Amino acid sequence: MRGSLAPPIFQTSVWVYGELEDYDAVARGDRPGHLYGRNSNENVAMLETALAELEGAEAGVATSSGMAAILVAVRALAPKPAPIVAPLDLYGGTLALFRNELEPAGYALRLVDFDDQGALRKALVGAGLALSETITNPLVRVADLPVVTRLAAELGVPVLVDNTFATPILCRPLELGATTVVHSVSKYIGGHSDLIAGVVLGSAALTADARRRSVLLGTTLGPFEAWLAVRGLRTLALRMPRHSASALQLAESLREAPGVNGVHYPTLSGVAQEEVSRRLLPDGAGGMLAIQLDGGRPAVQRLMERLRMTTFAASLGGVETTISHPEVTSHRALSAAERSALGIGPGTVRVSVGLEEPEDIVEDFAQALSP
Ligand SMILES: *Cc1c(COP(=O)(O)O)cnc(C)c1O
């Protein structure tokens, strides 16, 4: 690489060979190298190696999005259609993927409350896969992963964990018994709201299978996105503690705010999830929180208009603090009754707490919520 400190971008779709035997050796996997950009690329390989190391996995395969990572991971873990067990408050995109693509292909979805061990055990009987999320969207519930993985192991069911909200800095599900981990790299790992990518992390055999599927489906990642993700990754360990500390500070301040009748943050003192959250996320619970506003949608509109620094944007995990409204964004595919059963109402606001001065974030919400 001629001594460059930062990695160069290998913006090429194909590599040149002078010897048939060389090409053959790389194609067989006997020699490192790249052939064609849909199969692999040097920048993508750097991202995969770094994320596998961070997550404590044997190997990783990067994909064109978090959704693609979930799809190829599910197909690799449960190649034949089988029931999939997932939490009631599954990420909206994953729910839509299962309902629209996997259920018609024969995968029955068994949605269950992961806090109800009896119901979870029953749902796992005869299942092909369990999917869990470390911290759920938008009400930031923390599943007791050691319990989930133990129950699943007793019944021989592999567990796939979507670790997007926690990142490997705050939680490493493979160490808690998960079979495989996926991330939307678009969120905290990229960290700057400027790329879409995903990754599957697990054993060498599983990720090789996921890679073969991703290459066939054409869901592999391009070199520039991989390069951006590696750049973001360099500061992930610095960003996550700051996101976590600021989110906790904002959550505490919002408990007292006028017009707020509920604050959701995993390690807020006195909340139902506090014990499991502190046990699973000892270094911080991430930058996501949710609040319930009195006055429903008009109150959300008023908050949007009065916030000076914080903007409305339907993603998360970036440098800037943003708010989102699950009713019109992530959970718009659900009926009002389905949303209400999950605790999501017209006054629910999700906050992705950024890296600004924490006092500035607290002050922005305080002035916006003042009567
Ligand atoms: C955003 C997100 C996804 C989907 O990832 P994309 O990169 O948008 O495809 C999956 N799971 C969670 C928890 C997410 O937040």
Image (cartoon, rainbow, N blue to C red):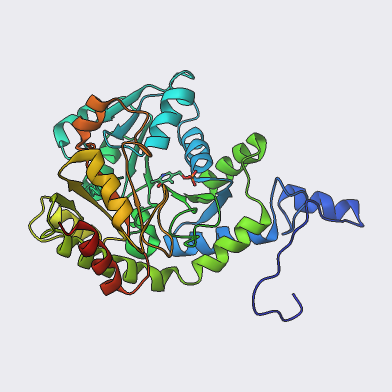
Q: Position of residue 335 (x, y in %)?
A: 29, 25
* Residue at the (43%, 65%) spot, across then down: 319
Q: Nearer the viewer, residue 199 or 213?
A: 199
Image quadrant holding the C terminus, namely bottom left
Q: Is residue 112 left or right of residue 204?
A: left
Asked which quadrant contains residue 213, the reply is top right
In the rendered view, tell whether residue 307 sits above or below residue 7.
Answer: above
**Quick check: which quadrant has ligand 1?**
top left
Q: Is residue 102 left or right of residue 330?
A: right
Q: Nearer the viewer, residue 35 or 260?
A: 260
Task: Single out the residue that lies furthest toward the right.
Answer: 18
Q: Nearer the viewer, residue 123 or 344?
A: 344
Q: Position of residue 223 (x, y in %)?
A: 67, 56
Q: Is residue 223 left or right of residue 288?
A: right
* Residue at the (24%, 37%) spot, across then down: 346
* Residue at the (54%, 50%) spot, across then down: 197
Q: Position of residue 135 (x, y in %)?
A: 29, 50
Whether residue 150 appears in this view of the structure is no
